[in-house]
Image (cartoon, helix red, strand yellow):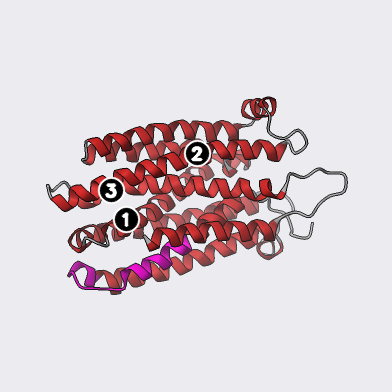
Amino acid sequence: MTGPLAGLLGAVLATWIAVWLTMSPPVPGVVLPPEAVRYGVPLARVLLDLALTATLGLSLLPMLLGQRDESALRRVFDTAYRAALVSAVTWLAAAVVSVALQTAEVAPVSGITAATLAAYVGDVSAAQGLLASAAVAVLAAVLAAVGIRFPGPLPARLLLITAGLGLLPLLVTGHAGELSARWHELTMVSLELHVYAATAWAGGLAATVGLLLAHPALLARALPRFSQLAGLCLAVVAGSGVLNALVELATTPGARLPSVLVTSHYGQLVLAKAGCLGALALLGGYVRFRVLPSVALGRRTALAGWVAGELAVLGVAFGLAVVLSRSGVLPSGD
């Protein structure tokens, strides 16, 4: 489980550091929420994203492994469904906590009360999206529990669809919704492709290596299939990420390319994410062309270490993405 833990640590540290570096200074006369809330909102969101990613990734395993009746395969399925139950419950809890923290963020004087919660949920689409995703998390937890009782590929397929549905309300109320109407449809499709590809890539990698490293025969069967999926996801993430960033920067009044990439927090975060993508391409390429052939032959490799590095970088990218979605395209000094 070193790889998934590396991803979690990378995400939390990247979120914390990025929030610290991009935090706005106090403004005289303006009441700001406590620092615990200012850090807690993005941290809760990145934990939500990671839990949802884990749920989706675990549901991919049966499709990567096939439907052979093997005792080792049944044990892996049982472990996967139990892990999916934990991740679904974490997803649910993180979504609910996010609503509470965001309420405290917009109402720093009155704080979290029944009235402020009701007003925030009633007026803000982001809160409604979080609660909708939380409702889907409940369904995901039920399907994972069914999979524990009746292990097999069908609950996993339903769980995969459910996790995908859980992403939708988070996307339609997200950053792309703020763009001009001229680009809205294009950027929404691009954002959906970006998020689904990143989720399948990170979740599938964590699940495949995290659960199959102790089963070399199963790993040799699943990893080549996942490698093909990961290559496609890399291409989709790169293309959609470049498009979304360019549209965001180009449609913001007063933003001048390319200088805005270094003079604004948004541009700096975009460059940091691009650096993560480049590192991931190198790590993934090494695993695919140097390590994977040995894994397919059942030989001992340093796969765990390389995948831990890849998941750590993916975690950093997830953390940066959360802070990026909360950043405006404005010069750092303004």
Which stretch appears magenta? 293-314
Marking on residue 229: 1
Using the image, tell me which numbered label, if any, was put on residue 93.
2
- 76 in relation to 304, above or below: above
Q: Which of marks 2 and 3 is nearer the N terminus?
A: 3
Between marks 3 and 1 in the image, the one whose residue lies nearer the viewer: 3
- The residue that disc 3 covers is 79
Q: What residue type is labelled 3?
A: Thr
**Residue 181, quarter of the rendered image:** top right
Q: What residue do we see at 17% from left, 61% from top?
A: 217
Cβ atoms under marks 2 and 1 closer than 8 Å: no
Give the residue displayed 73% in from the left and 35% down from the top.
107
Separation of marks 3 and 1 at Cα, in angstroms: 23 Å
User: Is residue 70 magenta-colored?
Assistant: no
Q: Kindly report the distance in space between the C-alpha atoms of the residues bearing marks 2 and 3.
A: 21 Å
Question: Foreground residue, 130 or 117?
Answer: 117
Rendered residue at 59%/60% (across/down): 270
Image height of 124 relative to 43, above or below: above
**Label 3 with label 1: CB-CB less than 8 Å:** no
Above-or-below relation of 191 to 294 = above
Q: What SS does tag 1 mark?
A: helix
Position of the N terminus by quadrant: bottom left
Q: What number is the disc on residue 270?
A: none
All told, the count of numbered labels is 3
